[in-house]
Image (tube, helix red, strand yellow):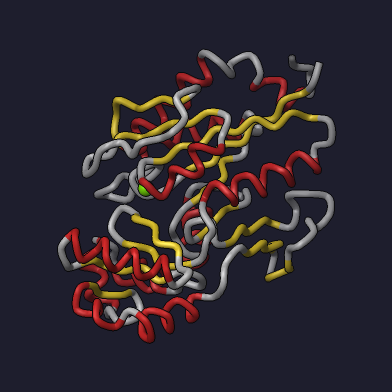
Amino acid sequence: MRKLKTLIFSDLDGTLLDHFTYQSTAAEKTLQQLESAGVPVILNTSKTLAELTIIQRELHLNTPFIIENGAAIYIPINTFKTQPADTILIDSYWVKSFSLPRQHWITLLADHADEFSADYQSFSTLSATELCKITGLNLAETERAKQRQFAEPLHWLGDEATKKSFVDRLISLGANVVQGGRFIHVGDFCDKGQALLWLTERYREHFDNISIFTIALGDGENDSAMLEAADIAVQVRSPVHDFPILYRQYKTTKTQLYGPEGWADAIQTLLANQLVSSLPSLNSGENHG
Ligand SMILES: [Mg+2]
């Protein structure tokens, strides 16, 4: 008999946050239930450290989080007994990075893909006011979104055929290109799945002799690697695009409801069916098969 600890990895935009309003109201009660049950909710997002610092506080989370599409993991220093290897201490976090800095990709775009420059607007050239119009965020939120450390998001203006040539060019130059909800992210070969696996291993080391069980929830193509890597994958329905295709079929569900409503519904179903008996043991330390 082995003990079981569940970790939940979740995307934000279009998943835990509504695509249009950025609100998580429909999921709040479920988040409280998970906190009471000792199940960490680990945000895994394309957003920046500046944005996550605020969102973690708003959602009352003191858990590790993953920023900029798997580029770095921020682990509050009280999460584990000792600092994980290959992390650095920044403020009150142990930080694991998987990516070259953003400037590398900005330089690459300027030096080797300049003929496409009329087909997109980039985060570094867009003003905060212009970005507000694209994202629907307010000015303060947009300033936080602009503080990117690892990848460069682009707002594509050209046609699909040109986009394919552009993406092929970037890939040949050693860049990784990920389609997010609103932006194309140009950066390093890191993804939300690699970050999930690395952090899950740290939990395994820390909770010696406990089985770690992972659930991932996401709506976008940039969530696919995370969804493929988890024990259970929940694809959250989007009001603006179809479900991205997953290779896995086993233990994969698609929500009927959109965004945070779908998120809460899926977790409630998992709580009611599969995990209802195991959750109390997370706190009490009872054995589980
Ligand atoms: Mg999303």
- Residue 258 appears in the figure: yes
Q: Is residue 252 above or below residue 116?
A: above
Q: Residue at x 76, y 62 (%)?
A: 86
Single out the residue that lies furthest toward the bottom: 111
Between 136 and 167, which is closer to the camera in this rendering? Answer: 167
Q: Residue at x 31, y 69 (%)?
A: 154
In screen coordinates, is 96 left or right of 1? left
Q: How many marks?
A: 0
Tell me the quarter of the picture where residue 66 sits: bottom right
How far across and how far down the image is residue 32, in percent? 53, 34
Identify the image quadrant of the N terminus. Answer: top right
Single out the residue that lies furthest toward the left: 159
Single out the residue that lies furthest toward the front: 172
Between 126 and 101, which is closer to the camera in this rendering? Answer: 101
Q: Residue at x 56, y 16 (%)?
A: 274
In screen coordinates, is 27 left or right of 80? left
Q: Is residue 191 above or below residue 35?
A: below
How far across and how far down the image is residue 222, in percent? 41, 50
- Residue 26 appears in the figure: no
Tell me the quarter of the picture where residue 93 sits: bottom right
Q: Residue at x 35, y 70 (%)?
A: 169
In screen coordinates, is 267 left or right of 80? left
Identify the image quadrant of the C terminus. Answer: top right
How far across and how far down the image is residue 285, in percent? 79, 24
How far across and how far down the image is residue 232, in percent? 53, 28
Between 239 and 78, which is closer to the camera in this rendering? Answer: 239
In screen coordinates, is 231 left or right of 47? right
Q: Is residue 211 above or below residue 141?
A: above
